Image (cartoon, helix red, strand yellow):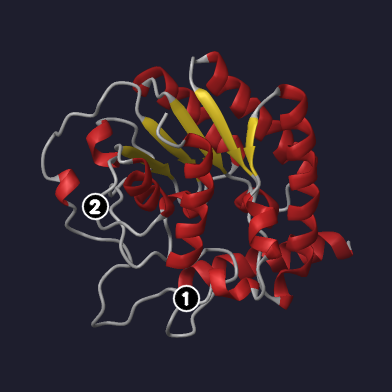
Amino acid sequence: MIVALCSFVGFASYRLARQYVFATDGNAGSPFASNCPAHAGAAGVRPRPVVTFGDSITEGYGATGNCVPPAVQTILPTSLHLVYSRDTSYPGDLARLIRRPVLNYGADDETTTEGLGRLRRLLRAVHPSSVVLLEGTSDLTAGQRPLSVAYRLLQMATTIRQAGARPILLTVLPPDGPHWTLLARQVEALNGLLRAGAKADHVTVVDSAATFAAHKPLAAFYRHHDGREDGIHPNDTGYRGLAVLVYQVIGHA
């Protein structure tokens, strides 16, 4: 009963954070760019692109600059998912580092159950060279067990490999703040399962969680200049750090 109550409180806190911590006032625009040059035309996307796939962290929630399609669940046309040159999401930073187009397939609030189906549709339509996968926070805040989440993430990695692409699995970022104590324990348990499972399955892992956790204070990756922070979605510095970690794996390949 206590665990269930804590899970409910955590999920409610997460939803409130999404609604209010980064909410804009009446004179401010959306946290995402409304006029994306990359979306102006049906620009071609090179064969076998790099794809970033996941939930709102991949989508770039809270980034100061970001171009995402109005309907983030859409798969085609791929040109809608091209990151813009001024994106400060981690896919935007990654594109500048590797100097190649990157497709952002982040979807707000997505769980791994939803993500597995969307990933299969994407792989049939896009045929990427690599898929960078970061998902699981929404599952845990909704009360899913770490073991179930790890199973689905490793299944997603296997699905990517079977489609002829390289899976690159990021460990789930540790939350910041005393109100996320239960979530932090669940994230730690999930990441332990992911590290062990990925090693057994020979899946490339980027241990973003370990890098974030080693940084003191952790809030430096989450707190914005105006003091806002929800403890889950990184700021531009955190997104840039994620991009660097992925770049170290992808490089110029």
Report the residue marked by disc 1.
20
Marks 2/1: CA–CA distance: 28 Å
Q: Residue, x 70% and y 55% (percent of image)?
A: 210
Closer to us: 137 or 208: 208
Q: Amino acid at mark 1?
A: Tyr
Residue 83 shown left or right of residue 195 in the figure: left
Q: Residue, x 63% and y 70% (percent of image)?
A: 13
For the question of whether residue 104 can be seen, the reply is yes
The spot of residue 226 in percent (x, y) is 43, 85
> In the structure shown, which secondary structural element does the residue marked by tag 2 occupy?
loop
Q: Amino acid at mark 2?
A: Ser
In the image as oriented, which residue stretches furthest toward the left?
41
The spot of residue 164 in percent (x, y) is 49, 15
Residue 11 shown left or right of residue 182 in the figure: left
Q: Quadrant of residue 86?
A: bottom left
The spot of residue 251 in percent (x, y) is 45, 37
Mark 2 or 1: in front is 2
Residue 92 shown left or right of residue 183 in the figure: left
Report the residue marked by disc 2.
85
Q: Earlier in the sequence, mark 2 or mark 1?
A: 1
Residue 158 shown left or right of residue 79 in the figure: right
Quick one: quadrant of the C terminus? top left
Q: Quadrant of residue 177?
A: bottom right
Q: Residue, x 88% and y 65% (percent of image)?
A: 2
